[in-house]
Image (cartoon, rainbow, N blue to C red):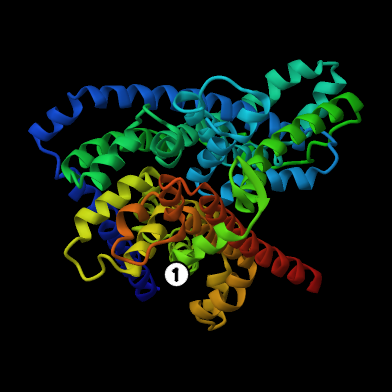
Amino acid sequence: MTRRRRAGLVINVSVALFFVAAVIAPIVSMLCRITRDGFSQTVGSEVFGRAVFNSAVTGLVSTVITLLLALVSALALERSRVPLRAVFGTLFVLPMLIPSISHAFALVALFGRNGILTGLFHIDGSIYGYPGIIAGSVMYSFPVAFLMFSGILAYEDGMTYRAAEVLGIPPHRRFFGITLPFLRRTLVSAFFAVFTMVVTDYGVPLMIGGQTTTLSVLMYNRAVGMIDYDAGSVIGSFLLLPAVAAFLVDLLLPERAESGFVSEPVVPGKSRVRDALAFVFSAAVSLCVLAPVLTFLVMVFETKYPVNATFTLAHIARALDRGAGKYLCNSVLYALLTAVFGTALSFLCAYLTARLRAPFSRALHLFSITSMAIPGIVLGLSYVIFFHKTPVYGTVLIVALANSVHFFASPYLMMYNTLGKVNPNLEYVGMTLGVGRMRIIRDVIIPKVKFTLSEMFVYFFVNSMMTISAVSFLAPPAPKPVSLMINQFEAQLLMESAAFVSILILIINVIMKAIVAALKRRELKGK
């Protein structure tokens, strides 16, 4: 037993040292680039002050709108008998399968100066600036908030509502007296998660912000456009603040009863008015979600958007001639490497912290969720600074490593929670019977958690396919991912080719999710 505990401790320490090298050290190296003069010059500039104000305004407004839409959408699916519930649930998460910059690009195509809807309905005003950033940010962050709310609502205990109904408490008082208190922790977590996503994303404001510069765009322009890593480090330190605040709040908030035992699920009663309203609202949200995809499909096959709607395949040919096929293969390679390495590392860390309970497990758990507090754009700059003179810089490996670290926390927590529900005595029974730990893991634990493993794999793959944050710093001179071609085509006014690239990313991600879903259904039918 002593030898086993020593082995567990050594593995824990080794993995923790990996996180020190892959997360802590790069961030520290970036922060060490900050000097007193550089800090005062950057922070004291007028453009920095405007960027902070713009980020705060767009972040707060987008977060409030997103939370309201996501909460009502989750309630519409979980607290009604709305028709086509499964279809709406799938459509609501569709925006997660394309880059954030694609949402902004779709808004430009619909509501820009020559937009489809702008010309059709003779809309005055401009989508650029605050309106565009807020609309694009809501589209980009909505699925995350929706999944948080729908996930927790699905596990709410229905006995409380049964008792309230027997006591004659009206529905609106049940909502404010039962549902909202139950969602309090999730609301706080969702607020910080969405606010952090909006403030640290540069794809939407870069595409549609116009003259409205946010902190993330300012950092991108300084670090990528002007190669000014000192100023980029200063701005990056400010972008860390909301992410660190979200991380600490989520870590320090006490667990509440929403994760406890559920005696019976909430079963909505019959109400034609409620179900009709839920259907209309869900259909409207789904239409907004589908608008970018439908816009891309129309644009790809138009001779000249928006003046000539004649069918053509020239834009697809142009994108392929400029390397879209090769860049797509690069992205698939990055995504597969990230998914394999990230899933294996997440499982290892979750097993060490949830099953071994070695003396260093708590510290490893904190290291494992630290990446949640680091925006991708900040991680990318820190990797450039830290790994610049190492053999992995400019290679496929550093991009896969950055993506694995960037998206690590959520899959790790998936597996950590799943392993916590597996019988904790399996390893002890195995030792008693003379069965090794590795055989227990291979023959018992992995079959029990294989569905979670598949979800982790898909999470890493999909996010690696569509990310533009860290890879924008790390890709050159490594093979360029296809997601970076969207901004490149848009800058050259090749809107139709940019739409084709967005469709390519969506198709690959949908195919991956469909394959995994089909394998799950086949496995369940086999049982």
Residue 302 x/y as whole percent: 63, 50
> Taking 98 as reference, is 326 above or below it?
below
Mark yes or no: residue 292 visible.
Answer: yes
Residue 282 x/y as whole percent: 75, 34
> Taking 299 as reference, is 80 above or below it?
above
Q: Residues within 10 Å of mark 1 (few under 14, many from 20)?
A: many
Which SS class for mark 1?
helix
Pick the quarter of the image with the C terminus: bottom right
Q: Residue at x 29, y 59 (%)?
A: 22
Q: Amino acid type of disc 1? A: Leu
Q: Residue at x 44, y 68 (%)?
A: 330
Residue 79 x/y as whole percent: 78, 33
Pick the quarter of the image with the N terminus: bottom left
> Taking 55 as reference, is 237 above or below it?
below
Residue 58 x/y as whole percent: 45, 25
Q: Which residue is mark 1?
A: 337
Q: Tell whether 413 sits left or right of 510.
A: left
Task: Out of 347 and 498, give the one closest to the viewer.
Answer: 498
